[in-house]
Image (spheres, rainbow, N blue to C red):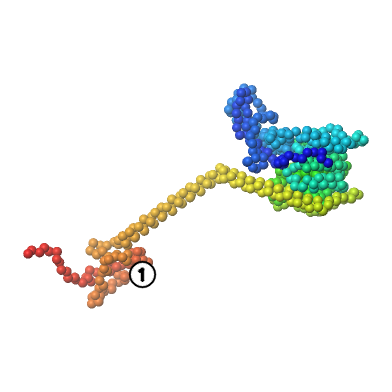
Amino acid sequence: MAFMEKPPAGKVLLDDTVPLTAAIEASQSLQSHTEYIIRVQRGISVENSWQIAGLSLPLPPKKLIGNMDREFIAERQKGLQNYLNVITTNHMLSNCELVKKFLDPNNYSANYTEIALQQVSMFFRSEPKWEVVEPLKDIGWRIRKKYFLMKIKNQPKERLVLSWADLGPDKYLSDKDFQCLIKLLPSCLHPYIYRVTFATANESSALLIRMFNEKGTLKDLIYKSKPKDPFLKKYCNPKKGQGLELHQIKTYGRQILEVLKFLHDKGFPYGHLHASNVMLDGNTCRLLDLENSLLGLPSFYRSNFSQFRKINTLESVDVHCFGHLLYEMTYGRPPDSVPVDSFPPAPSMAVVAVLESTLSCEACKNGMPTISWLLQMPLFSDVLLTTSEKPQFKIPTKLKEALRIAKECIEKRLTEEQKQIHQHRRLARAQSHHGSEEERKKRKILARKKSKRSAIENSEEHSAKYNNSNNSGSGASSPLTSPSSPTPPSTAGISTLPPPPPPPPAAPLPPSSTEMPIQLQPQAMNGLSRGALLSSIQNFRKGTLRKAETCDHSAPKIG
């Protein structure tokens, strides 16, 4: 059944959960107004950035007179930057279609409601028993997923909800396997899974029909909201939320854990648990949107758990998302940030124990517990579930293998993204630390110490070289001598002067108690130590020298 066209070749499937950051780079004064130039970046890669000009959102206070002054423009730019930071860091606002279209007009310029209406109209040509009552505008958070209120022509009072969704970046199933698995969803029977009435798909998108529930989802119960209202109107104000009773927390939590365990045992990847995907049917929670993982859609909390490298499997993703859900059920609002350092008072310490095992710094750093381990914790172990419906979901072996491969590919992309984020954070921390004022002072002090040490070493080296040159340049150092003492021979070992003759044996030198014997053994300095040289000078006696007979031929000859 080809009710929708194939996607164009080379179509880029964007991950809409990748956060966009915006920074005002400059401003320019035009004829009657000031235009601010904003650089927008997708994720951590600087290459995925672009510039936009103009700002059509609520702005800081304006000024009638002097609004072109340089000081006012700079002050206003700071206010605009703070406003953009608030929007881009708010989890719900940052995923809003209006924000995406403003910050990234090239990728979000399409009218997805029109596209969905065209696809649904083509579907009705072959399925005439269905009829659209009205579009349910913006009741969900996804930009590329649209909802319509439906009815069956022969049952006009019964209301159903049709959901249409485009493919996402994690769609790794082949087209044939994808369509087979989508059409298999109506056969899934479980007491805690919301029943799919009809499902079909083609190569580019999927369409599913479920019964409309007037009570809405678990998130509608927490925020006391109406299911048909827009998503931001229902949930963006956290003051409206109210935590549930302890018995509700225990029962709903146990039911959700049971259905997650069932899907994990079947090898069916989920990864999309949050309060809006849990339908309330009386006192029973039923899981929604099993098709999301088949379509390859990113998780609502992906920008959160992609920061932690230990949350790298779809099972651990489900456990972490269950922690978010439990926090919202307990306190009536989502956590301000994750990991959570300390938890507010809860109805029971058993609730805090589960929250610590899924949302604390230690849990995010070391990894998530298993579903079976959570079921054995005191908060859920004593909950008795009464249901007569027998679970049934038969998946052919061939499709199980396709699901396993697709699951591995989804986890591989998540791991690679986490690795890139981790490297980017390390580099950013190093740059921030290196550029801090304290670090700059430390580097200056170290540079001064190094400079002083180098100067001292150079001075010592120069002094040593100077002494060595004096010692070796003209032989040994000249000893102190009296005017009547002859110059001693050179001790360098290369002198051509003959050594002094030894004293004759007939006239030995009488020993003196004050005279030291000649010692030639001390450590040599250029062949002879100074001590030995001085001893030789002190023991020298002029009378011990033999008289030499000379023939003086220097007199002039007269002849």
Q: Position of residue 163 (x, y in %)?
A: 82, 39
Residue 495 visible at all? yes
Q: Residue at x 25, y 71 (%)?
A: 501
Q: Quadrant of residue 479?
A: bottom left
Side of 356 where 525 appears, left or right = left
Q: Residue at x 65, y 47 (%)?
A: 420
Quadrant the C terminus occupies: bottom left
Task: Give the farthest residue toward the top.
Answer: 65
Side of 46 where 125 appears, left or right = right
Q: What kind of residue is marked 1?
A: Gln
Other residues around mark 1 within 10 Å, as few (<14) / some (14–19) / many (≥20)? few
Front one among 317 and 218:
317
Task: Give the farthest residue toward the left.
Answer: 559
Residue 139 visible at all? no
Side of 17 where 387 appears, left or right = right
Can you identify the residue that label 1 sits on? Answer: 521
Q: Position of residue 81 (x, y in %)?
A: 64, 34
Q: Position of residue 222 (x, y in %)?
A: 81, 39
Front one among 461 and 441:
461
Question: Against 228, is 252 above or below?
Answer: below
